Image (cartoon, rainbow, N blue to C red):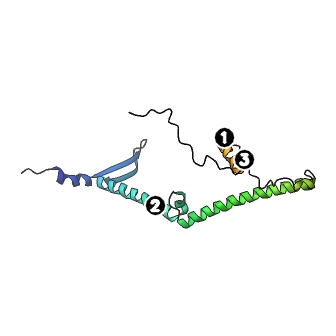
Amino acid sequence: MKRNKKSPDFFPRKRSKYKLTFFNESSLEDVWTICFSRFGAILTSILLIVFIVLAIFSIIVGTPVRNLLPGYLKTEERIEMVDKILRVDSLAAEMQRRDAYIKNLSAILTGEIKIDSVGQQADSLLAARNDTLLPQSKRMEEYIKNRKRNIPSAYLLPPPPSTENYSTPR
């Protein structure tokens, strides 16, 4: 039976030494020299990659950088963040109401609005604002009119789609 020569020859080829030399071209003087084998170069590159991965992992786990990654927030932190967002939202709405109140009060004090007409005007702070960016559809306007008059609306559910343009298979 004939033996395969490649298998015993594999490790000696990996352990053979190589020399990498950097030299100055003008004086032909060695600047830097390193000796290595294929096995050592492969082992060094694997260790370097593992070290880089471990460094990145430790930076992400050990510092607040993990909060920037999706899914790494703790539930308590997420609840606290939502609570703070809602609080900021309500404070912004409160500031808008106070600004409107101060504006109305200054108008009364300067005489732009007569004191007798104050009781007849609707409260501007409680008035609903119309959204000018999205106009209402005719169906929505009709629904709002019927709702204000307490008439039961026919639009509780959307109407079924029309089947005039569709052909039925035979």
**First of labels 3, 2 by sequence position:** 2
Amino acid at the residue labelled 1: Lys
Element marked by disc 2: helix
Is 135 on the left-hand or right-hand side of 116? left
Q: Quadrant of residue 46?
A: bottom left
Disc 3 packing (10 Å; few <14; some 14–19; many ≥20): few
Residue 161 pos. (x, y %): 53, 40
Element marked by disc 1: helix
Q: Residue at x 72, y 50 (%)?
A: 149
Residue 98 pos. (x, y %): 79, 58
* Residue 60, disc: none
Residue 97 pos. (x, y %): 77, 57
Q: CA distance from mark 3 to mark 1?
A: 15 Å
Q: Quadrant of residue 93?
A: bottom right
Amino acid at the residue labelled 3: Asn
Is residue 111 at least partly visible in the picture?
A: yes
Labels 1 and 2 touching (C-beta < 8 A): no
Please give the residue where the numbered disc 1 appears in the rendered image.
Answer: 138
Please give the residue where the numbered disc 3 appears in the rendered image.
Answer: 130
Amino acid at the residue labelled 2: Phe
Q: Residue at x 39, y 47 (%)?
A: 22
Please give the residue where the numbered disc 2 appears in the rendered image.
Answer: 57
**First of labels 1, 2 by sequence position:** 2
Disc 2 packing (10 Å; few <14; some 14–19; many ≥20): few
Q: CA distance from mark 1 to mark 2?
A: 57 Å
Q: Residue at x 35, y 49 (%)?
A: 20
Which of labels 3 and 2 is toward the front?
A: 3
**First of labels 3, 1 by sequence position:** 3
Question: Of residues 25 and 126, which is closer to you in this image?
Answer: 126
Is 6 on the left-hand or right-hand side of 29? left
